[in-house]
Amino acid sequence: MSDIEDWKKIGIMGGTFNPIHIGHLLLGQWAMEEATLDGVVFIPTGNSYMKDRSAMLPGTERLAMTELAVADRACFRCLDLEVRRGGDTYTYETLEALHTMYPGAQLYFIVGADCLFSIENWYHPEKIFRRCTLLAASRSGMPLETLEKKQKELKDTYGAEIVLTAFPNVEISSTDIRSRRREGRSIQYLVPDSVREYIESNHYYENS
Ligand code: ATP
Ligand code: MG
């Protein structure tokens, strides 16, 4: 199914994607299989208040790299709604917007399982849980009982639908990719080739 309007189950990967890397793509792929999603939308943030801005490329540039990364997968899409809105972005607003855009679809918000312990501090958690199922990917090192306890707690408080799924550790981060660039080391195999070429030809992340 290549038309997003026809998707019944949409996965959502949010992130700064500064830059997008293989860990993000693998998580999207993993979530698709685990929850039998029709596809995953990757949504780069506007220039978020949560992150150190000094090494942060503008939203339009992070968006361009994300578009390159998903270009060869019909079930992976890149959406510009947060970048277009600019400034701080709140997950609940994005979920409301997606619900309006795709009213027939079930939304699955894909996060690392550690998010279960911070999501109550996000803006309007009750609105987040009203609009989506949380697909929480646990990595080794976090005991399942701890996660299940939190899952139940969020269910009782917010009626939250949370699916826990084990995701293998892929120790890749955008932070690591940026520091490799600063040190003049290769980022091949850590990001798709199209993204690497884009980064190299624009001399991104070469100086801190
Ligand atoms: P930074 O190092 O700049 O914080 P990052 O690599 O953590 O970047 P983000 O854009 O902050 O990437 O992450 C977006 C989402 O992807 C988050 O939900 C994060 O938990 C998840 N994520 C990031 N890296 C990985 C990875 N290697 N494996 C699985 N999930 C990841
Ligand atoms: Mg991060």
Image (cartoon, rainbow, N blue to C red):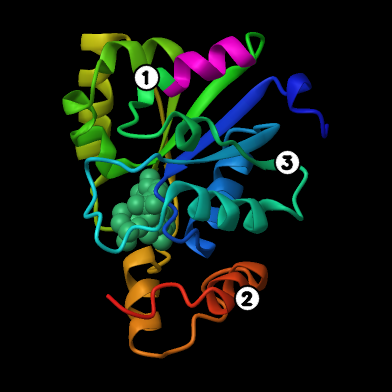
Magenta part, dominant SS: helix
Instruction: Classify residue 86 as left or right of residue 12.
Output: left
Q: Earlier in the sequence, mark 2 or mark 3?
A: 3
Q: CA distance from mark 1 to mark 3?
A: 23 Å
What's the residue at 67%, 69% (across, down)? 194
Q: Type of residue at label 1? A: Tyr
- Residue beneath disc 2: 197
Is residue 132 at least partly visible in the picture? no
Quarter assignment of residue 111 = top left
What's the residue at 67%, 52% (across, down)? 70
Q: Secondary structure at mark 1?
A: helix
Q: Which residues are magenta?
A: 94-101
Q: Quadrant of the N terminus?
A: top right
Residue 98 lies within the magenta run:
yes
- Residue beneath disc 1: 92
Query: Residue 3 placed where, x, y %?
Result: 81, 28
Quarter assignment of residue 76 = top right
Q: CA distance from mark 2 to mark 3?
A: 23 Å
Instruction: Classify residue 199 as left or right of residue 71.
Output: left
Q: Secondary structure at mark 2?
A: helix
Residue 87 lies within the magenta run:
no
Q: Which mark is residue 75?
A: 3
